[in-house]
Amino acid sequence: MRLVDLHWLPAMPSAAADLRALSRAGAPALADLRPLAAARLDFVQTATLDRLLARALATPDRHLRPLRIALLGSSTLAHLEPALRVAGFRRGLALSVHRGGYGQYRQDLETPSPALAAFAPDTVLLALDAAHLAAGADPGLDAAAARALAARSVDSLIRCWRRARALWGAQVIQQTALASAAVPLLGANEPRLPGAPAALLAAINALLPDAAASEGVDLLALDAAAARDGLFAWHDPALWHRAKQEVSPAAAPAYGELAARLLAARAGLSAKCLVLDLDNTLWGGVIGDDGLEGIRLGQGSAEGEAFAAFQSYARDLSRRGVILAVVSKNDEAAALAPFDHHPDMVLRRADIACFVANWNDKPGNLRMVADRLNIGLDALAFADDNPFERALVRRELPMVAVPELPDDPALYARAIADSGCFEAVAITEDDRARTAAYRADAARAALRETETDLDGYLESLGMVLRWRRFDRTGLPRIVQLINKTNQFNLRTRRYSDAEAEALIADNASLALQLRLSDRFGDNGVIGVVIGKRADDALFLDTWLMSCRVLGRGVERATLNLLASEAGRMGAGALVGEYRPTPRNAMVRGHYAGLGFAQAGAEDDGAETWRRDLAGFVPFATSIAIEEARP
Amino acid sequence: MTHDSIALEVADIVRDVLDAPDLAIGPDTTADDVPGWDSFAHINIVVATEARFGIRFGTAEVETLHNIGDLVALVARKTKVAA
């Protein structure tokens, strides 16, 4: 996970082709460029997008906040400009960049050229290379002389900052020193040579935070980024000699992103609220199916500890002013249970300002969160382990930040941190009290109708439902699903291994395993249906599904499949039964929703439903149905 | 990977860097033939080629490149593809 790879942005396989097509066409529409700016692009693609952006912004867009930034430095900076503008656009800024003369930052500030004076920057980014900052380094210096040299370097930076403020009232961003010029002379004990470049640069970087804080200057922490990624991910010594590029062009997109975050934070455009999914995001497993004892959280497994660590990270974010919310596909009671009763939960109900657990689509629920908290959708960042949900939210609500999450929960916190959604420049008492205040507001706020173009999204997924009769290979997963699925389970009839195995050769029954794949990959076996002949009908002894694929029309596609297979078996109707349990309220309306008519009710709440197959018209779905051959 | 597929990819990199999606590129194409192919673009072409093929050119090697054919041959050599 390197910052230079922009791993929190989604990959976009069509980016290269899309950029070429847009380059050939006339003036692009800004809306066509947004998905590209939100995707993981390399530096060449970033430069192409920057040229397209310039064409699109020939007509200014009132939704983007204009900002003028002067990029001043001591070596080559031209290759950083496109990345700055593209990253600014990603965060709602229309950046104009004025690049100072090569190596001329002092002259630019002492006696600005007429062009720079007329430009009058809002922000000055001082991008100084380490070779320049380490000028005067001498391994022969003693500790006191080296300290004095570092202090003089920082003093001269402070004079630059003050000058930028005096000239234009500009906000200043100071890039910290890369260790590019710090080739060790001693080795592991390099700090014992205080006058050598390595120690001198380290001393300068150590002095910068206090100086910047007292001068109100923001730091672009290149040294921290290189410590994460490795120096050579950011700096290529060959390119330094060839072109005096301190930051390699390959790292330019990440450089632009780090700078744009600071600009966005100053402009109040950072996200304010982290919206969390629950199952497999805050704990391992599915609370509705696995129950309090079954979810993996906290001590006892490495995975459980990783989820607890992610919760700690979220709680720490809330302590510094980020609002927390929950949006989860769950019954509310089941979703709340861990917050109230699980001993290893780090987050508690009081940490969550707005808690939404229902079976509606997530974009609609995110709108509701924004409404209840009375913040903009662009103030939300959404963390969900499920790539389906992430892509749906990106498509429906492009203003919501949706960082990619890696498969391993141990890396969730890092992914959110690296995404820079919550970049902040200072913390106030208000920040610390924020979650409590928002929770009170949300409790009062009303709900509003929400609409999502779900059909269009589902159509774009290329979903295929692959069905197959029970077989020996599939048996372990089938038995597992039958015995652990509690929520989407019409009768909650459990089967032993032997009972399920007996169905393999039972030609009078229809025992099916269902897999769902889409453009994100194969979701595995997500459903099981067992039908048994009863008089003229096929009785649906078992119908269950993984909640992970809810809301995609899988139920309707499954019914289409059942109708055709039942017809092949000579059955004239489907008969289903709903047997209520404490966990399966979500499928109470299942058969009614599929056009079944109620045919009976028992005292214990069980209901019988029937659908005749004469004249059956299949439901329209976005799912292709295929029989999987061995 | 073959010599031809390298040549196609290198040509795409050059077109992308120069923002010239329909530029005709052959082994004899040199920077002088193409408007906009300055030293800045040249570095971007080299860096993008290194990234695409997961290789690294030596400082001296870069200075021996005179045309597209040289660049393709260098990539082929570094990725162990026979000519």
Image (tube, grey):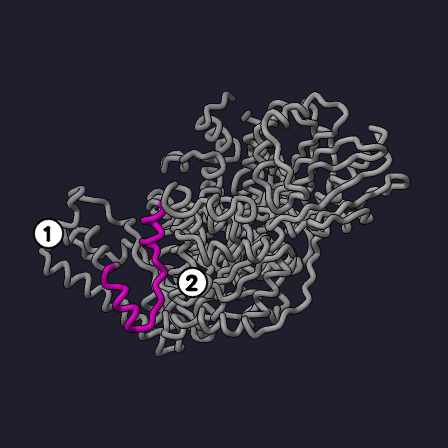
* Quadrant of the image occupied by residue A188: top left
**For the residue carrying disc 1, how many other residues have a C-alpha within 10 Å: few (<14), some (14-19), or many (20+)?**
few
Q: Is residue A139 left or right of residue A405?
A: left
Image position, residue A91 (x, y; %): 52, 62
Magenta residues, dominant SS class: helix
Q: On the same chain: label 2 and label 1?
A: yes
Disc 1 chain ID: A
Indicate whether residue A207 is drawn in magenta. yes
**For the residue carrying disc 2, how many other residues have a C-alpha within 10 Å: few (<14), some (14-19), or many (20+)?**
many
Residue at 70%, 30% (x, y): give it. A511
Sequence-first tag of 2 and 1: 1
- The residue singled out by tag 2 in the image is A423
Residue B18 in view, yes or no: no
Determine which of the numbered discs, if any, sits on residue A140 in the image: 1
User: In this rendering, is residue A75 above or below B28?
Assistant: below
Q: Which quarter of the image is occupied by the N terminus of chain B?
A: top right
Image position, residue A334 (x, y; %): 54, 54
Mark 2 → mark 1, Cα distance in angstroms: 41 Å
Q: Nearer the viewer, residue A39 or A193?
A: A39
Residue A589 in view, yes or no: yes
Q: Nearer the viewer, residue A522 or A271?
A: A522
